[in-house]
Image (tube, rainbow, N blue to C red):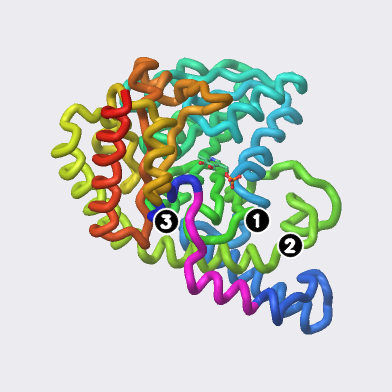
Amino acid sequence: MHYFDHSATTPLHTQVKNLMNEVGELHFGNPSSVHSLGRKARVLIETARKQMASAIGCEPQEIIFTSGGTEANNQVLWNVARNDKKHVVTSVIEHPAILKTLEHLSDFGVTYTAVRVDENGLVDPQDVENAITEETGLISIMLANNEVGTIQPIADISAIAKEHGIMMHSDAVQALGKIPINAKEIGVDCISFSAHKFYGPKGIGTLFIKNGLKLKPLIYGGTQERSVRAGTENTIGITGLGLAAELAAKNVETSADHFYSLTEIFKEQLNNILPDAVYHGHPNHRLPGLISVSFPNYRNDLLMAHLDRRGIAVSSGSACSSGDVKPSKILSAMNVDDHLNICTLRISFGLGNTLEEVTILTKAIHSSLEQIRSAA
Ligand SMILES: Cc1ncc(COP(=O)(O)O)c(C=O)c1O
Protein backbone atom coordinates (compact mmCIF):
# COMPACT_ATOMS: atom_id res chain seq x y z
CA MET A 1 0.00 0.00 0.00
CA HIS A 2 1.23 3.49 -0.82
CA TYR A 3 0.04 5.63 2.05
CA PHE A 4 -0.78 9.32 1.43
CA ASP A 5 -3.17 9.92 4.34
CA HIS A 6 -0.82 11.18 7.04
CA SER A 7 -3.24 13.89 8.16
CA ALA A 8 -5.57 11.08 9.27
CA THR A 9 -2.80 9.32 11.14
CA THR A 10 0.89 8.46 10.86
CA PRO A 11 2.70 5.17 11.40
CA LEU A 12 4.87 4.86 14.52
CA HIS A 13 8.44 6.13 14.15
CA THR A 14 10.80 3.14 14.51
CA GLN A 15 12.63 4.70 17.45
CA VAL A 16 9.29 5.42 19.13
CA LYS A 17 8.09 1.85 18.55
CA ASN A 18 11.31 0.43 20.04
CA LEU A 19 11.09 2.66 23.09
CA MET A 20 7.43 1.79 23.67
CA ASN A 21 8.19 -1.93 23.42
CA GLU A 22 10.94 -1.55 25.98
CA VAL A 23 8.78 0.47 28.35
CA GLY A 24 5.91 -2.01 28.02
CA GLU A 25 8.14 -4.93 28.76
CA LEU A 26 10.36 -3.57 31.51
CA HIS A 27 8.87 -0.47 33.07
CA PHE A 28 5.32 -1.47 33.90
CA GLY A 29 5.25 -0.04 37.40
CA ASN A 30 2.51 2.37 38.42
CA PRO A 31 4.09 5.84 38.26
CA SER A 32 2.44 6.66 41.60
CA SER A 33 4.06 3.69 43.36
CA VAL A 34 6.94 4.46 45.67
CA HIS A 35 9.02 1.36 44.89
CA SER A 36 11.75 1.47 42.28
CA LEU A 37 9.56 0.15 39.43
CA GLY A 38 7.07 2.93 40.09
CA ARG A 39 9.81 5.52 40.40
CA LYS A 40 11.29 4.43 37.05
CA ALA A 41 7.88 4.87 35.37
CA ARG A 42 7.62 8.33 36.97
CA VAL A 43 11.03 9.29 35.58
CA LEU A 44 9.95 8.16 32.10
CA ILE A 45 6.80 10.26 32.27
CA GLU A 46 8.64 13.35 33.48
CA THR A 47 11.24 12.89 30.73
CA ALA A 48 8.44 12.77 28.16
CA ARG A 49 6.93 15.93 29.68
CA LYS A 50 10.27 17.72 29.25
CA GLN A 51 10.57 16.48 25.66
CA MET A 52 7.06 17.71 24.82
CA ALA A 53 7.66 21.05 26.55
CA SER A 54 10.92 21.60 24.75
CA ALA A 55 9.28 20.71 21.39
CA ILE A 56 6.86 23.64 21.79
CA GLY A 57 9.01 26.06 23.83
CA CYS A 58 7.22 25.92 27.16
CA GLU A 59 7.89 24.73 30.74
CA PRO A 60 7.33 21.04 31.62
CA GLN A 61 4.77 21.99 34.30
CA GLU A 62 2.68 23.57 31.52
CA ILE A 63 2.08 20.14 29.93
CA ILE A 64 -0.63 17.66 30.86
CA PHE A 65 -1.18 14.35 29.09
CA THR A 66 -4.62 13.41 27.78
CA SER A 67 -6.07 10.55 25.75
CA GLY A 68 -5.66 12.55 22.54
CA GLY A 69 -6.58 15.73 20.71
CA THR A 70 -10.30 15.24 21.27
CA GLU A 71 -9.91 15.04 25.04
CA ALA A 72 -7.50 18.01 25.12
CA ASN A 73 -10.09 20.10 23.25
CA ASN A 74 -12.91 18.86 25.52
CA GLN A 75 -10.83 19.65 28.60
CA VAL A 76 -10.73 23.31 27.59
CA LEU A 77 -14.29 23.63 26.30
CA TRP A 78 -15.96 21.99 29.33
CA ASN A 79 -14.35 24.62 31.53
CA VAL A 80 -16.48 27.26 29.83
CA ALA A 81 -19.62 25.51 31.09
CA ARG A 82 -18.33 26.12 34.64
CA ASN A 83 -17.48 29.80 33.99
CA ASP A 84 -19.67 32.80 34.49
CA LYS A 85 -18.88 33.82 30.94
CA LYS A 86 -20.30 31.08 28.76
CA HIS A 87 -19.85 32.40 25.22
CA VAL A 88 -17.17 31.00 22.90
CA VAL A 89 -15.81 32.48 19.68
CA THR A 90 -14.60 29.82 17.26
CA SER A 91 -14.50 29.30 13.49
CA VAL A 92 -16.73 27.41 11.07
CA ILE A 93 -13.86 25.14 9.97
CA GLU A 94 -12.87 23.68 13.35
CA HIS A 95 -12.63 19.91 13.84
CA PRO A 96 -15.78 18.16 15.22
CA ALA A 97 -13.83 17.75 18.49
CA ILE A 98 -14.53 21.48 18.89
CA LEU A 99 -17.77 22.10 17.00
CA LYS A 100 -19.68 19.00 18.13
CA THR A 101 -18.58 19.57 21.72
CA LEU A 102 -19.79 23.16 21.59
CA GLU A 103 -23.14 22.02 20.17
CA HIS A 104 -23.49 19.58 23.04
CA LEU A 105 -22.47 22.19 25.61
CA SER A 106 -25.56 24.22 24.74
CA ASP A 107 -27.29 21.84 27.22
CA PHE A 108 -25.07 23.46 29.87
CA GLY A 109 -25.74 27.06 28.88
CA VAL A 110 -22.77 27.51 26.55
CA THR A 111 -23.33 29.57 23.40
CA TYR A 112 -20.91 30.14 20.57
CA THR A 113 -20.24 32.19 17.47
CA ALA A 114 -18.40 30.47 14.64
CA VAL A 115 -16.74 33.12 12.48
CA ARG A 116 -16.59 32.69 8.71
CA VAL A 117 -13.46 32.01 6.68
CA ASP A 118 -12.52 33.43 3.28
CA GLU A 119 -12.15 31.36 0.10
CA ASN A 120 -8.66 30.31 1.22
CA GLY A 121 -9.94 29.06 4.57
CA LEU A 122 -8.44 31.98 6.47
CA VAL A 123 -10.05 33.52 9.57
CA ASP A 124 -10.01 37.32 9.72
CA PRO A 125 -8.89 38.40 13.25
CA GLN A 126 -11.22 41.39 12.90
CA ASP A 127 -14.19 38.99 12.59
CA VAL A 128 -13.05 37.32 15.82
CA GLU A 129 -12.91 40.67 17.59
CA ASN A 130 -16.33 41.65 16.25
CA ALA A 131 -17.81 38.40 17.60
CA ILE A 132 -16.67 39.08 21.17
CA THR A 133 -19.47 39.93 23.59
CA GLU A 134 -19.61 40.78 27.30
CA GLU A 135 -20.23 37.08 27.86
CA THR A 136 -17.23 35.71 25.91
CA GLY A 137 -15.09 33.45 28.10
CA LEU A 138 -13.02 31.67 25.44
CA ILE A 139 -11.67 32.08 21.91
CA SER A 140 -10.77 28.76 20.25
CA ILE A 141 -9.28 28.86 16.75
CA MET A 142 -7.29 26.00 15.22
CA LEU A 143 -3.67 26.56 14.27
CA ALA A 144 -3.92 24.63 11.00
CA ASN A 145 -6.86 23.05 9.25
CA ASN A 146 -7.03 19.29 8.84
CA GLU A 147 -8.65 19.27 5.41
CA VAL A 148 -7.07 22.14 3.49
CA GLY A 149 -3.99 22.92 5.60
CA THR A 150 -4.58 26.66 5.97
CA ILE A 151 -2.61 28.15 8.88
CA GLN A 152 -4.47 30.76 10.90
CA PRO A 153 -3.03 34.07 12.18
CA ILE A 154 -3.07 32.76 15.76
CA ALA A 155 -0.61 35.32 17.19
CA ASP A 156 -2.86 38.17 15.98
CA ILE A 157 -5.98 36.49 17.36
CA SER A 158 -4.21 35.82 20.68
CA ALA A 159 -3.30 39.49 20.92
CA ILE A 160 -7.00 40.37 20.55
CA ALA A 161 -7.93 37.79 23.21
CA LYS A 162 -5.35 39.27 25.58
CA GLU A 163 -6.56 42.83 24.98
CA HIS A 164 -10.08 41.75 25.95
CA GLY A 165 -8.93 39.58 28.85
CA ILE A 166 -10.33 36.41 27.26
CA MET A 167 -8.78 32.94 27.47
CA MET A 168 -7.35 31.75 24.14
CA HIS A 169 -7.09 28.13 22.97
CA SER A 170 -5.77 26.67 19.74
CA ASP A 171 -6.18 23.15 18.34
CA ALA A 172 -2.72 22.47 16.90
CA VAL A 173 -3.27 18.75 16.32
CA GLN A 174 -2.31 18.96 12.63
CA ALA A 175 0.67 21.25 13.00
CA LEU A 176 3.42 19.65 15.12
CA GLY A 177 6.26 18.33 12.97
CA LYS A 178 5.11 20.30 9.94
CA ILE A 179 5.73 23.87 11.12
CA PRO A 180 7.76 25.18 14.07
CA ILE A 181 5.56 25.89 17.08
CA ASN A 182 6.48 28.11 19.99
CA ALA A 183 3.77 28.34 22.64
CA LYS A 184 5.18 31.57 24.05
CA GLU A 185 5.46 33.29 20.66
CA ILE A 186 1.91 32.51 19.57
CA GLY A 187 0.72 33.77 22.91
CA VAL A 188 -2.13 31.33 23.57
CA ASP A 189 -3.26 30.07 26.97
CA CYS A 190 -3.93 26.47 25.91
CA ILE A 191 -2.92 24.33 22.92
CA SER A 192 -4.04 20.79 22.00
CA PHE A 193 -1.82 18.14 20.38
CA SER A 194 -2.20 14.48 19.45
CA ALA A 195 0.72 12.04 19.18
CA HIS A 196 -0.62 9.93 16.33
CA LYS A 197 -0.34 12.88 13.96
CA PHE A 198 3.43 13.12 14.48
CA TYR A 199 4.57 9.47 14.37
CA GLY A 200 3.62 8.73 17.95
CA PRO A 201 0.97 6.32 19.24
CA LYS A 202 -2.79 6.70 19.02
CA GLY A 203 -4.87 7.48 22.10
CA ILE A 204 -2.43 9.89 23.71
CA GLY A 205 -2.26 13.68 23.50
CA THR A 206 -1.14 16.76 25.28
CA LEU A 207 -2.68 19.97 26.47
CA PHE A 208 -0.43 22.95 27.04
CA ILE A 209 -1.86 25.03 29.90
CA LYS A 210 -0.06 28.32 30.44
CA ASN A 211 1.51 28.78 33.88
CA GLY A 212 -0.92 30.40 36.28
CA LEU A 213 -4.05 29.29 34.44
CA LYS A 214 -6.27 26.96 36.47
CA LEU A 215 -8.52 24.51 34.62
CA LYS A 216 -11.09 22.34 36.31
CA PRO A 217 -10.75 18.59 35.57
CA LEU A 218 -12.76 16.90 32.90
CA ILE A 219 -12.06 13.51 34.49
CA TYR A 220 -12.17 13.26 38.30
CA GLY A 221 -10.38 10.79 40.53
CA GLY A 222 -6.76 10.70 41.67
CA THR A 223 -4.27 13.53 41.74
CA GLN A 224 -2.37 12.62 38.57
CA GLU A 225 -1.39 15.40 36.15
CA ARG A 226 -1.56 18.08 38.83
CA SER A 227 -5.14 16.96 39.59
CA VAL A 228 -6.31 18.22 36.19
CA ARG A 229 -6.50 14.76 34.61
CA ALA A 230 -7.12 11.84 36.93
CA GLY A 231 -6.27 8.24 36.10
CA THR A 232 -3.13 6.08 36.11
CA GLU A 233 -0.89 7.47 33.42
CA ASN A 234 -0.47 5.68 30.10
CA THR A 235 3.28 5.30 30.55
CA ILE A 236 3.86 3.51 27.23
CA GLY A 237 1.86 6.09 25.28
CA ILE A 238 3.36 9.05 27.11
CA THR A 239 6.97 7.93 26.55
CA GLY A 240 6.12 7.35 22.87
CA LEU A 241 4.58 10.81 22.63
CA GLY A 242 7.60 12.44 24.28
CA LEU A 243 10.12 10.93 21.90
CA ALA A 244 7.87 11.51 18.87
CA ALA A 245 7.51 15.19 19.84
CA GLU A 246 11.26 15.58 20.28
CA LEU A 247 11.95 14.04 16.86
CA ALA A 248 9.15 16.03 15.19
CA ALA A 249 10.44 19.36 16.50
CA LYS A 250 14.11 18.56 15.87
CA ASN A 251 13.50 17.55 12.25
CA VAL A 252 10.76 20.04 11.39
CA GLU A 253 12.76 21.95 8.77
CA THR A 254 14.03 18.91 6.88
CA SER A 255 10.56 17.36 7.07
CA ALA A 256 8.97 20.52 5.66
CA ASP A 257 11.54 20.64 2.82
CA HIS A 258 10.75 17.01 2.01
CA PHE A 259 7.00 17.69 2.01
CA TYR A 260 7.44 20.77 -0.21
CA SER A 261 9.45 18.89 -2.81
CA LEU A 262 6.93 16.02 -2.92
CA THR A 263 4.13 18.58 -3.33
CA GLU A 264 5.92 20.40 -6.16
CA ILE A 265 6.51 17.19 -8.10
CA PHE A 266 2.93 16.07 -7.51
CA LYS A 267 1.51 19.34 -8.82
CA GLU A 268 3.79 19.30 -11.82
CA GLN A 269 2.86 15.74 -12.72
CA LEU A 270 -0.86 16.25 -12.09
CA ASN A 271 -0.79 19.33 -14.29
CA ASN A 272 0.25 17.13 -17.21
CA ILE A 273 -2.63 14.76 -16.55
CA LEU A 274 -5.40 17.14 -15.54
CA PRO A 275 -4.60 20.83 -16.10
CA ASP A 276 -8.01 21.86 -14.75
CA ALA A 277 -7.43 20.35 -11.27
CA VAL A 278 -8.41 22.91 -8.61
CA TYR A 279 -6.38 23.35 -5.41
CA HIS A 280 -7.85 24.56 -2.13
CA GLY A 281 -6.39 26.24 0.93
CA HIS A 282 -4.20 29.29 1.32
CA PRO A 283 -1.43 29.51 -1.31
CA ASN A 284 1.23 30.52 1.25
CA HIS A 285 -0.09 30.16 4.80
CA ARG A 286 -0.44 26.42 4.68
CA LEU A 287 0.92 23.17 6.06
CA PRO A 288 3.56 21.60 3.85
CA GLY A 289 2.57 18.28 2.29
CA LEU A 290 -1.21 18.56 2.74
CA ILE A 291 -2.94 18.93 -0.63
CA SER A 292 -6.65 19.46 -1.13
CA VAL A 293 -7.40 19.06 -4.82
CA SER A 294 -10.58 18.78 -6.88
CA PHE A 295 -10.83 16.64 -10.00
CA PRO A 296 -13.75 18.34 -11.78
CA ASN A 297 -16.45 15.86 -12.82
CA TYR A 298 -14.86 12.89 -10.99
CA ARG A 299 -16.69 12.06 -7.77
CA ASN A 300 -14.26 11.48 -4.93
CA ASP A 301 -15.91 8.26 -3.68
CA LEU A 302 -15.42 6.69 -7.12
CA LEU A 303 -11.89 8.01 -7.48
CA MET A 304 -10.92 6.81 -4.00
CA ALA A 305 -12.30 3.33 -4.72
CA HIS A 306 -10.28 3.14 -7.95
CA LEU A 307 -7.14 4.33 -6.17
CA ASP A 308 -7.67 1.89 -3.32
CA ARG A 309 -7.79 -0.95 -5.83
CA ARG A 310 -4.44 0.27 -7.12
CA GLY A 311 -2.96 0.19 -3.62
CA ILE A 312 -3.19 3.93 -2.94
CA ALA A 313 -4.58 5.37 0.32
CA VAL A 314 -5.85 8.95 0.20
CA SER A 315 -8.91 10.55 1.76
CA SER A 316 -11.67 13.02 1.15
CA GLY A 317 -13.17 15.55 3.47
CA SER A 318 -16.68 14.73 2.48
CA ALA A 319 -18.77 12.30 4.44
CA CYS A 320 -20.04 9.31 2.54
CA SER A 321 -23.13 7.50 3.74
CA SER A 322 -25.06 4.82 1.83
CA GLY A 323 -23.64 5.79 -1.54
CA ASP A 324 -24.41 9.48 -1.12
CA VAL A 325 -21.46 11.82 -0.97
CA LYS A 326 -22.15 14.83 1.20
CA PRO A 327 -20.08 17.93 0.46
CA SER A 328 -17.31 18.76 2.93
CA LYS A 329 -18.46 21.43 5.37
CA ILE A 330 -15.01 22.98 5.35
CA LEU A 331 -14.91 23.37 1.57
CA SER A 332 -18.50 24.69 1.60
CA ALA A 333 -17.45 27.27 4.18
CA MET A 334 -14.72 28.30 1.73
CA ASN A 335 -17.38 28.85 -0.95
CA VAL A 336 -16.42 25.80 -3.01
CA ASP A 337 -19.56 24.82 -4.95
CA ASP A 338 -21.06 21.40 -4.22
CA HIS A 339 -20.20 20.00 -7.61
CA LEU A 340 -16.48 20.64 -7.16
CA ASN A 341 -16.66 19.89 -3.45
CA ILE A 342 -17.65 16.25 -3.94
CA CYS A 343 -14.80 15.84 -6.45
CA THR A 344 -12.10 16.66 -3.92
CA LEU A 345 -9.38 14.48 -2.45
CA ARG A 346 -7.00 15.14 0.43
CA ILE A 347 -3.49 13.89 -0.19
CA SER A 348 -1.17 14.19 2.80
CA PHE A 349 2.46 13.23 2.44
CA GLY A 350 4.60 11.75 5.19
CA LEU A 351 8.23 11.30 6.06
CA GLY A 352 8.39 7.85 4.45
CA ASN A 353 7.00 8.95 1.06
CA THR A 354 9.47 9.20 -1.81
CA LEU A 355 9.54 11.01 -5.16
CA GLU A 356 9.09 7.60 -6.83
CA GLU A 357 5.92 7.06 -4.84
CA VAL A 358 4.57 10.41 -6.02
CA THR A 359 4.98 9.16 -9.58
CA ILE A 360 3.16 5.95 -8.63
CA LEU A 361 0.38 8.11 -7.18
CA THR A 362 0.00 10.35 -10.23
CA LYS A 363 0.11 7.33 -12.58
CA ALA A 364 -2.62 5.67 -10.50
CA ILE A 365 -4.69 8.85 -10.64
CA HIS A 366 -4.18 8.99 -14.41
CA SER A 367 -5.32 5.41 -15.02
CA SER A 368 -8.22 5.78 -12.55
CA LEU A 369 -9.47 8.89 -14.32
CA GLU A 370 -9.22 7.14 -17.69
CA GLN A 371 -11.09 4.11 -16.42
CA ILE A 372 -13.85 6.23 -14.89
CA ARG A 373 -14.12 8.26 -18.10
CA SER A 374 -14.34 5.19 -20.32
CA ALA A 375 -16.99 3.60 -18.09
CA ALA A 376 -19.17 6.73 -18.14
C1 LIG B 1 -7.58 19.36 13.87
C2 LIG B 1 -7.88 18.14 14.68
N1 LIG B 1 -8.29 18.28 15.95
C3 LIG B 1 -8.54 17.21 16.73
C4 LIG B 1 -8.41 15.93 16.24
C5 LIG B 1 -8.72 14.76 17.14
O1 LIG B 1 -7.54 14.20 17.65
P1 LIG B 1 -7.54 12.70 18.26
O2 LIG B 1 -7.67 11.78 17.08
O3 LIG B 1 -6.23 12.57 18.93
O4 LIG B 1 -8.66 12.62 19.20
C6 LIG B 1 -8.01 15.74 14.92
C7 LIG B 1 -7.90 14.37 14.36
O5 LIG B 1 -8.10 14.13 13.18
C8 LIG B 1 -7.72 16.87 14.12
O6 LIG B 1 -7.32 16.75 12.84
Q: Position of residue 323 (x, y in %)?
A: 52, 24
C-alpha gap between disc 2 and disc 3? 34 Å
Which residues lie in the magenta part?
Answer: 9-22
Q: Decide: marks 2, 1 in contact (CB < 8 A)?
A: yes
N-terminal label among 3 and 1: 3
Q: Residue at x 60, y 19 (%)?
A: 112
Q: 10 Å neighbourhood of mark 1: few (<14), some, or many (≥20)?
A: many
- Residue under label 1, please give it: 65
Task: Give, as a three-letter code, the residue at label 3.
Answer: Met
Q: Main secondary structure of the magenta part?
A: helix
Residue type highlighted by circle 1: Phe
User: Mark 2 or mark 3: which comes first in sequence?
Assistant: 3
In the rendered structure, which disc, 2 or 1, sits on the residue that comes first in sequence? 1
* Residue at (54, 29) in percent of width and height: 139
Residue 347 placement (x, y as % from top left):
36, 43
Q: Secondary structure at mark 1?
A: strand
The N terminus - image quarter? bottom left
18 in magenta? yes
Pointer 3 residue: 1
Q: Is residue 265 above or below residue 73?
A: below
With 200 as the anchor, is 372 left or right in this view?
Answer: left
Q: Which residue is mark 2?
A: 233
Q: Quadrant of ligand 1?
A: top right
Residue projecting furthest to the bottom:
36
- SS for tag 2? loop
In the image, farthest residue toward the right: 221
Residue 95 vs residue 211, the one in the foreground? 95
